[in-house]
Structure formats: C-alpha cells, structure tokens
Image: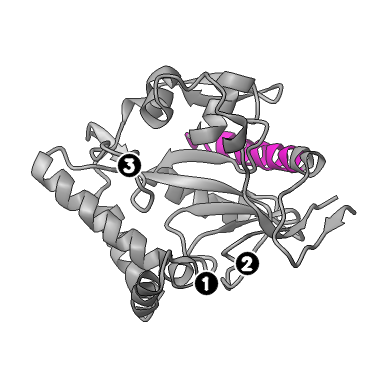
Amino acid sequence: MNSHIKKMPYYLSPIELRKLHHVLVEMLEEVDRVCKKNNIKYNISAGTLLGAIRHKGFIPWDDEMDITMTRNEYIRFRDVCKYDLDKERFFFQDHTTDVHYPWGYGRIRYKNTEFVRVGQEHLKMKTGIFMDIVPLDAVPDNKLMRGLHCFYCFVLRKFLYAESGMINGKNVLQRGIYRFMNLVPRKVTFYLLDRLAMRSKNDKSKYVRILTYPLPKRKVYGMNRIWFEEVENLEFENRMFPGTKDWEGFLSYFYGDDFMQLPPIEKRRWHPAVKFRLPY
C-alpha cells in the first residue's frame, strides 16, 4: 500500500496527484453505478466539468471532484447509499451521518485513506479521500426575495465555517468573531439549513444554487436550472458521464468567457495537505 503521512504541510507530487485522480475516477464510477441503478439524475460540475471540456479528464493540477444534483435527487441518493453503496470501500458523509461534519453538502469518502488539507487538521469529522456531492436548491423568482435568500445563505454559511474560521481567519478580530459564532451548536445551524432547503424545493424556479457555497461575484441570483435538466454524456478520463448540454454557458458563468485558456503557471495550484494516504 502506498502511504504518505506528513506532519508538515506539503503539496502532492505529480505522481501522487495522478494516483489520486485514479482513485477519484473509481469513486465516480461507483456513484454513477448507484445513480443509474436507482434512476437518480446528476451532473459532473465545476472544475470536473471544466476538465471534461478542456482536457477530456482532470485539470492536471486539480485534486478534487464535484457532482451536483437537485435536492430531491440528493435526498434519494443519500437514502440509497445506506444499502446500495459499496460499503467495503466507501461511505456517504454529511451532517446526518457524521455529527462532526461541518459543510452543507455531502461527500463520498474512500475508507482507509487520508486527505486532510491544511487548515482542517483540527476538525473532528471523519477523513479520507473524497468527492463532493452537492445539492441544488431553488432560488426565489421574486427579485427582492432573492436578495434576502442570498443573505440568509451567507449567514448560514458563515456559521458552518466558524469552526474553521476561528483558526484560519485573516486576523485576530475575524478569528474572534468566528470563535464566538462557533458557540452556536452546529445542529441548530443545520436545523435552519434543512428548513430552508425544504422551503426551497420549488422545481419550477428559473434559478437554483448551492445554499452554503458562494456564487461568483455579481452572480447573486443563482444558476440556470436548465443547465442541470438538459444533459448529455461527456468524455472524462476515457469514460462517459452526464454533464450539462450548455456547458459553454455554465463554464462562462463560473470561469469567464476565456475558460478554455490555461491560467498562468503560478496559479496552477492544488491544496496543500497535512495527511495523505492512498488506498493501494
């Protein structure tokens, strides 16, 4: 078994990064199998979608994987993972399966592995190589309500981030504010988040969003729902997975019109780790 446990922060080597890619593809194949078996709709998204379009696979320096699904599909996926997910290798993680998990979306974790990023080593959640499973919720059609909805999402996100922010805040004042916010029990924040999600299940709204993840600047209304309803199979690491048909519109929204251009070398960074261990 390949094993790399580092006490000091370090960046994965290109060889380690490529091995991580193989593990993430293995995880995506399992998610794809579970979704197909149970007729659950999902999309590869964010940097994973950009990699599919620009590289036919991973962005070479990327160390994560993202898929999205509507809230209803997400709940179904979470439920079927209890009996359909290969529990020898993987487990589904969100606040309902791990009381210490601090984020507002789910993850599939690879058992008996490690990937702890710098700044998260103090968190008590279960760790391991992961891929993000991100639920999408409706954004109000009324413009005034959109603004209030966006602000409420911002507040909830900050409370969920408090345990990290009290260590990683930019200055003493910010860390102190997060430390105070962290006194609010996480279950209270998740209760409010779950209520918001249930109120945001309108499947006919024009826009959707990730409730606890910031939108691109000046994009306060969310993402076009049609991006997640009209899909096609896209090539990714010599396999085919579902992604939006209007990938150009989606990627322009997130990364700008020049998304096909490679960023400068100094910006091609992946996350530094304090612990990393592959499954084989």
Task: Identify the mark at residue 209; answer none if there is no mark.
Answer: 3
Task: Identify the mark at residue 126; answer none if there is no mark.
Answer: 2
Q: Earlier in the sequence, mark 2 or mark 1?
A: 1
Q: Are marks 2 and 1 in contact (CB under 8 Å)?
A: yes
- Magenta: main secondary structure: helix
Residue 86 is at least partly visible in this image? yes
Q: Earlier in the sequence, mark 1 or mark 3?
A: 1
117 up-or-down from 62: above or below: below
Residue at 77% x, 61% y is: 112
Tell me which amino acid carries mark 3: Arg
Q: Earlier in the sequence, mark 2 or mark 3?
A: 2
Using a 10 Å C-alpha cutoff, classify the residue at mark 3 as few (fewer than 14 neighbours), some (14 to 19) or many (20 or more).
Answer: many
Percent x, y of residue 155: 27, 61
Q: Secondary structure at mark 3?
A: strand
Is residue 8 on the magenta stretch?
no
Give the labeled residue for mark 1: 100
Report the span colored magenta: 20-41
Tell me which amino acid carries mark 1: His
Question: How far apart are labels 2 and 3 at the CA level?
Answer: 26 Å
